[in-house]
Image (tube, rainbow, N blue to C red):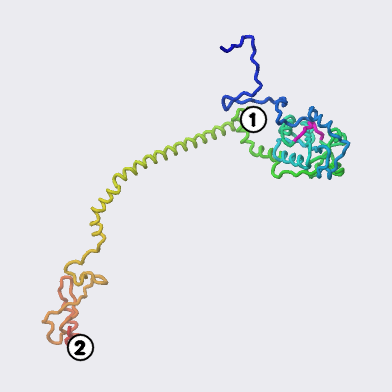
Amino acid sequence: MDKMPEEDEVSPVSTAPSTPTSPLEFKMLPLFMDFEEFNICQPAPFSYDDKAMLELERCDYTQRITYQMARAGKTTRRVRVYSDGIYDLFHQGHARQLMQAKNIFPNVYLIVGVCNDELTLRMKGRTVMNGFERYEAVRHCRYVDEIVPNAPWSLNEEFLNEHKIDFVAHDDIPYGAGGVNDIYAPLKARGMFVVTERTEGVSTSDIVARIVKDYDVYVRRNLARGYSAKELNVSFLSEKKFRLQNKMDELKTRGKRELTKVKVDIITKWEEKSREFIDAFLLLFGRERLNNLWNESKGRIIQALSPPGSPNGSINGDDPDAIEGGESEDEYMELPPEYAAGNVVSGKQRTTQNRRGQVNPSLNAFDEVEAEDEDLPYTRRSD
């Protein structure tokens, strides 16, 4: 049997990181920690750390490096380049500027100076992040080799010699302070200034402007995450308003979710019913059923599509009652033989008859009188 540990025995504490048992369980690093156990990659040391001090002692600053030598890579030691700033809300513009400073020469040891809160507040204004947060953001950038905390606003000869700085990297825009138009002008005159480019479209001021623009959105989000109105510097009425808006948005989201669920259920049920309708239709009107219906109704369809025959008693298929121009009372008929004597025209004579076939004798008399006055003998026309 395995030996059970005694009560006074203390099991050794494993230094290896424990494997999380659930996705929500993970190891939290302390805010202040020793990075010695991270032997592959570590953040940049501060200027007073042993690693930075050792690098400073190895540098032979008596051997000055010119710009041409640094560009050509003809140096016997690493070129020490210094870049300074506030680095508030560390963003991609800061990282790109440091990347340019790191790669401006073939063999660069990049030193970054970060001003403290007191100096920044006096010279520029309030920052969003405090000094410690800004230091940590910069020293965890992979282009940085060393951090100088509490950096001065303008550089003098003493500071340059203390840190053995060969070149200073910054953008070429004149930066005025304390009545001076450009604090980097002396370095430019001495040939110790190298130019980096700014990243367009991003800056700390732009990020702050975005936050101010969407102030209500961020306040509501932080209230929903558990921040108090006092922590957010929000009044009592504003807090109630923001919380009401959060409740309304939550109800809207829930309503959309439920509506989507109902739509999905309706579509699913409709698909099921449509399959049943299709199956029932195929049973009633399948191929065999349609063939039977066609055979049964084929004769009726042909009879319905054929033209009707001529009616009985019509002459040449024409209806005597349907004459072009409508039903007219003027028709031609054969006169009886008694009207053929004298100077009355025999044969076909125009007469008027009504619907019952009775001849109107008044028109015949009028025709005879008109013929006698004109003394025009009538001859019998042959049919």
Q: Nearer the viewer, mark 1 or mark 2?
A: 1
Q: Identify the residue position indicated by label 1 in the image.
A: 235
**CB contact under 8 Å: marks 1 and 2:** no
Instruction: Find numbered disc 2 in the image and state the secondary structure of the residue it sits on.
Output: helix
Side (left or right) of 310 relative to 139: left
Can you tell which quarter of the image residue 321 is in?
bottom left
Side (left or right) of 344 relative to 148: left
* First in sequence: mark 1 vs mark 2: 1
At horizontal 29% and vertical 45% (from top left) the residue drawn is 284
Q: Which amino acid is tagged 2?
A: Asp
Q: Residues within 10 Å of mark 2 (few under 14, many from 20)?
A: few
From the viewer's side, name the closer residue of 353 and 55: 55
Regarding residue 345, the answer to whether it shows in the image is: yes
Q: Identify the residue position indicated by label 2 in the image.
A: 373
Residue 149 among those drawn in magenta: yes
Instruction: Find numbered disc 1 in the image and state the secondary structure of the residue it sits on.
Output: loop
Q: Residue furthest front?
A: 1
Residue 190 among those drawn in magenta: no
Residue 345 position in % (x across, y down): 16, 84
Side (left or right) of 44 relative to 265: right
Q: Residue furthest left?
A: 338
